[in-house]
Image (tube, helix red, strand yellow):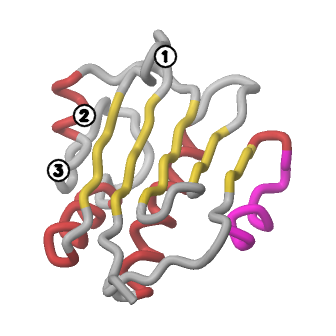
Amino acid sequence: MKELKARESHHDRLIIRSPSGGWLSRIDPNASGIMLNIHFENALKHTRGDLPVHVDASQMGRVVISNHRDTLAPEDLDVIKQRFKRKGPMSDGYCLGLSIVHELCNHSGCTVELISPQSGKHRGSTAILNIPLTRE
């Protein structure tokens, strides 16, 4: 979370609810870092307007990332998970990020849910990453 805060030059564009303590998980730290980084990058890149990106990691084993963007149709939510598929012809990048997240989730036991529009709103998107925890 500290790295994410440090990367964002406009601190008013990012609201982070950090965990109150550490989480123990069997997930490879590199894999979890890749998954989180892709979601953070997407949220910051695709947000529209002056509203901030919200990252909520206050609940153990769950990271919720929300931004204010154009609404994605249900079929677009399926397409953006596929390798080299784009929502539109003018999209930036190679469209690998979410396909990488889904592959890492499949191998690690994580789940990811993409929601658009945000719950109770007419715009925005939310990505919910659930990370399996280990018992001490």
- Out of 99 and 129, give the one closest to the viewer: 129
Above/below status of 57 relative to 28: above
Whether residue 4 sits left or right of residue 26 in the image: it is: right
Q: Position of residue 20 (x, y in %)?
A: 67, 66
Badge 2 amino acid: Leu
Q: CA distance from mark 2 to mark 3?
A: 10 Å
* Foreground disc of the pair 1, 3: 1
Q: Residue at x 68, y 64 (%)?
A: 4
Say if mark 1 contacts mark 3, CB within 8 Å.
Answer: no
Whether residue 136 sits left or right of residue 1 in the image: it is: left
Label 2 vs 3, first from the N-terminus: 2
Q: Which residues are magenta?
A: 1-11
Residue 113: mark? none
Above/below status of 22 relative to 92: below
Task: Identify the secondary structure beneath mark 1.
Answer: loop
Q: Position of residue 18 (x, y in %)?
A: 67, 60
Q: Which residue is mark 1?
A: 123
Whether residue 111 sits left or right of residue 72 in the image: it is: left
Q: Which residue is mark 3?
A: 82
Magenta stretch encompasses residue 135: no
Q: Which residue is mark 2?
A: 77
